[in-house]
Amino acid sequence: MVHIAPKHLAHALALLSFLSSANATRNSDLVRVLGPQGVNLWKLRAETTKASKFNLEGTENAQSVLFKTDFRPRWYWVNDRHYNASVGGPVIVIDGGETSGEDRLPFLDTGIAEILAKATGGVGVVLEHRYYGASIPVDNFTTDSLRWLDNEQSAADSANFMANVKFDGIEEDLTAPNTPWIYYGGSYAGARAAHMRILYPELVYGAIASSAVTHAALSNWEYMEVIRLAADPKCSSHLENSIKTIDQILDHRIFVGRLKALFGLKDLEHDEDFVALLESPLGSWQSKVWDPTVGDKTFDKFCEALNGHANVAIAELPFNHTSRMVTVAEGFRVDFAIVNYAKWIKQHIVSECPSDKTVEQAFPPGKHFTVPSLPNVTAVNALGDFDLAADRLAFIDGAVDPWRPDTPHSDYAKDREDTILRPFKLIPGAVHHWDEYGLENILEEPHEILKIHGEMIGFVQDWLKDWKAPSKV
Ligand SMILES: *[C@@H]1O[C@H](CO)[C@@H](O)[C@H](O)[C@H]1NC(C)=O
Ligand SMILES: *[C@@H]1O[C@H](CO)[C@@H](O)[C@H](O)[C@H]1NC(C)=O
Ligand SMILES: *[C@@H]1O[C@H](CO)[C@@H](O)[C@H](O)[C@H]1NC(C)=O
Ligand SMILES: *[C@@H]1O[C@H](CO)[C@@H](O)[C@H](O)[C@H]1NC(C)=O
């Protein structure tokens, strides 16, 4: 905790009222003086930035409209094209999660916020997360400066926003709890959506937690297991056999140097670092999306590279067959899949490695804050973990999402019923928060996506039927 001398506090308060157009530097001076409890991002941002009207007229996509209209930094974006004051529609807010709000604009334009706003006469909003995009309340990212980046603080940001926002061009009071707010998030933001419903039930009327990682864990082999079972069988067996072989080489210690050199990593000392790099292509599985215009094709390209052999007949032979073996060094022969694997890692991963510092070197202990040696998963799991549940809180997951084992759809979680009040839906064949993406004409969406969107519209409309404004006191 920072101790605030009264004279500093007074100084800070004077600054606060004085600076009508404070810039980011002055604001973070304030942050410093006030200490952790003084970081009220709502107030900071209200000083520096103005609400941005997200004009969606015409045929341009969201991004180009954004850049044309205004260059001021933004931290929330509004889609009011379907807003109808006489139906008293909800506010559908998309939690921006761990990236800039701009990256979430497609979800406001044709994705889930647009779909739900259209169905309810509501307003769609993307809300940026602190420390991302234009919502950075500090001057730099030193260890000390990062001490206000935590779950509690960012949840409070959302609550402040919901309770205070005044949208440009909309007369009515749309703040919570006077207006029903539906809080949507995917992935990390999905967990935040679930947590918001638990932590701020009076503000969050309903929440949709998509691919919500409500279970925090320090190890997560289950992530890879989902991919192993779901990937193209040929690719999956090449991966499995390659890793089995590599494990044996590492165990026996003969040719370890040759093996690492094959991957372009001859100087990498620790085996753990080496095998961690071998995992990296699997990280691209979660970026697959049903919409080919946004989905990432890296995983499929990796599989193609892994499986590739000039001679199709040889490629069909079982792993380790003599004809498949490639001589890497005198007495060291490996299956061609390992050679392909090595080439991919060398070209796509090693070549990208910055000669940078480790986390411990980059974030040495500060004056006010030290990075904990391990994250406190207990604190996160205390909010409900696999059992997290509430009325008007929906969980939507993808059957082949590598994060599914960390959601209420995990095999470790208790089974639940899917009800209107507590929707619990698994999209067959889907990966990571696939319901967040949408097409301008939703009838052109693949069957499973159209189906989930229909169900989401249905339960949100049902929730809204039960809405009663709180009685004013
Ligand atoms: C707004 O909603 C009212 C009530 O349902 C309806 O009569 C009206 O046509 C709607 N306005 C627009 C512009 O859609
Ligand atoms: C980072 O920012 C803080 C406060 O804004 C400042 O006191 C500190 O000197 C900065 N550190 C570096 C390394 O720039
Ligand atoms: C392939 O052959 C190597 C060397 O004989 C052996 O260590 C490895 O276990 C074999 N791989 C598989 C998947 O059987
Ligand atoms: C982790 O969080 C829990 C619950 O908030 C708390 O009781 C515990 O002391 C924390 N553990 C550490 C190591 O900080």
Image (cartoon, helix red, strand yellow):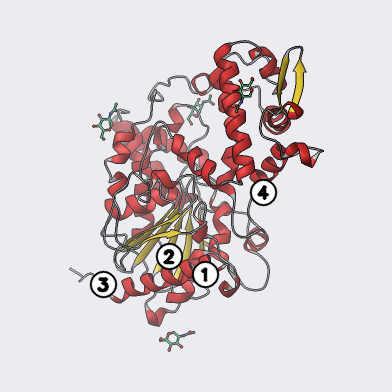
Tell me which residue sits at (76%, 12%) in the image.
Answer: 330
Q: Are marks 2 and 1 in contact (CB under 8 Å)?
A: no
Q: Residues within 10 Å of mark 1 (few under 14, many from 20)?
A: some
Image quadrant assignment for residue 311: top right
Nearest to viewer (mark 2 / mark 1): 1
Query: Residues under labels 3 and 1: Cα distance?
Result: 31 Å
Name the spot of residue 307 as percent of width and height, x first: 70, 39
Rendered position, 467 above or below 264: below
The residue tagged 4 is 297
Q: For mark 2, what is the residue?
A: 92
Residue 37 in view here: yes
Give me the disc on residue 450. Answer: 1
The residue closer to the viewer here, 183 or 323, is: 323
Q: Amino acid under label 2?
A: Ile
| Relative to 85, 239 lies left or right | right
Between label 3 and label 1, give the one nearer the viewer. Answer: 1
Closer to viewer: mark 2 or mark 4:
4
Residue name at image x 58 percent, y 52 percent: 103
Regarding mark 1 in the picture, which secondary structure is present there?
Answer: helix
Q: CA distance from mark 1 to mark 4?
A: 22 Å
Q: Please report whichever mark, 2 or 4, sits nearer to the chain's N-terminal start.
A: 2
Q: Which residue is mark 3?
A: 469
Q: Is mark 4 within 8 Å of ligand 3?
A: no
**Which mark is first along the chain, 4 or 1?**
4
Image spot of residue 104 (x, y percent): 55, 55
Q: Report whether residue 53 is seen.
A: no
111 versus 28 height, above or below: below
- Helix, strand, or loop for circle 2? strand
